[in-house]
Amino acid sequence: MFTGLVETLGKVITIEPIDSGIQFTIETEWENPDLKIGDSIAINGACMTVTEFSDLGNLFKFYASFKSLELTNLSRLGEGSTVNLERAMALGQRFGGHMVQGHVDGMAKVISRKKIETEVEEFWVEIPKELQRYFVKKGSVTLDGISLTVVDVKDGNIQLILIPETMEKTNANTWKKDQRLNVEVDVLAKYIENYLEQRSGS
């Protein structure tokens, strides 16, 4: 389980095809982050498993299967790409953002980006048709692992307003028109939908 509060940025150092997927090496600014093999880390919002790490923890590797690559934007990463990183929640820590599972539901597309105030930016993002029913004004969404508030919803697109803190500490500063973003809808919306379907079928 994650919160959608990005802890740090990572940079893709190497990409190696192996078996039925790809192994990525990520360089981070973490120092002694208490990592161990088998730990879960959200990479652009996709829950992946640490397969190897350096003594200082500033380098680690993870493996993505072809299925994971098909469902996420990890397949679009290249050497030098910047990724958002968040370790799984620890029991008892303060909970910010919203409940994030690290299970990517699809890929959204950036429609537009513009500054509306000094260092405050507006994005419109197109949501896949099959996921549009989960979005409401002032609801929550995870894009590339970032917990964000939906400002408005219009014709299958959502409006986001990103403050300087978010732009500085995440890879949102690299987003551009037509870029694909990992999207995870609010899990509470899916639970409510399932409950109502069960009720209507009973």
Image (spheres, rainbow, N blue to C red):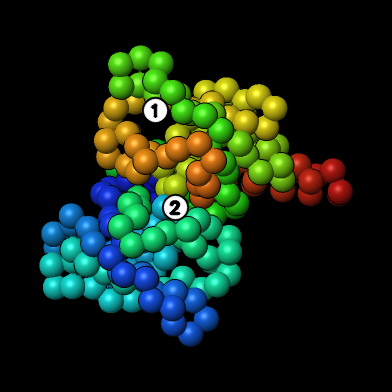
Does dot 1 land on a helix, a strand or a loop?
Answer: strand
In the rendered image, which residue does mark 1 sit on? 162
Q: Earlier in the sequence, mark 2 or mark 1?
A: 2
On the picture, is 199 further left or further right than 69? right
- Vertically, is 76 above or below 113? below
* Residue type highlighted by circle 1: Leu
| Residue appearing at x 27%, y 39% in the figure | 169
Q: Are marks 2 and 1 in contact (CB under 8 Å)?
A: no
Vertical comparison of 106 with 125: above or below: below
Q: CA distance from mark 2 to mark 1?
A: 17 Å
Q: Is residue 198 visible?
A: yes
Q: Report the side of 156 relative to 64 (left or right).
A: right
User: In this view of the protein, which residue sits in the foreground, 189 or 25?
Assistant: 25
- Looking at the image, which residue sits at the far right? 201
Q: Give percent across and percent down for residue 52.
A: 28, 76
Q: Label 2 neighbourhood size at 10 Å, few (<14), some (14-19), many (20+)?
A: many
Of residues 90 and 110, the one drawn nearer to the viewer in this rendering: 110
Residue positioned 37% across, 71% down in the render? 15
Image quadrant in which the N terminus is located: bottom left
Q: Amino acid at mark 2?
A: Gly
- In the depicted structure, whether residue 187 falls above or below residue 56: above
> Nearest the camera: 9 or 98?
9
Q: Quadrant of residue 189?
A: top right
Identify the residue shown where x is 26% and y is 49%: 8
Q: What is the residue that sits farthest to the top in this orientation?
A: 117
Residue carrying label 2: 45
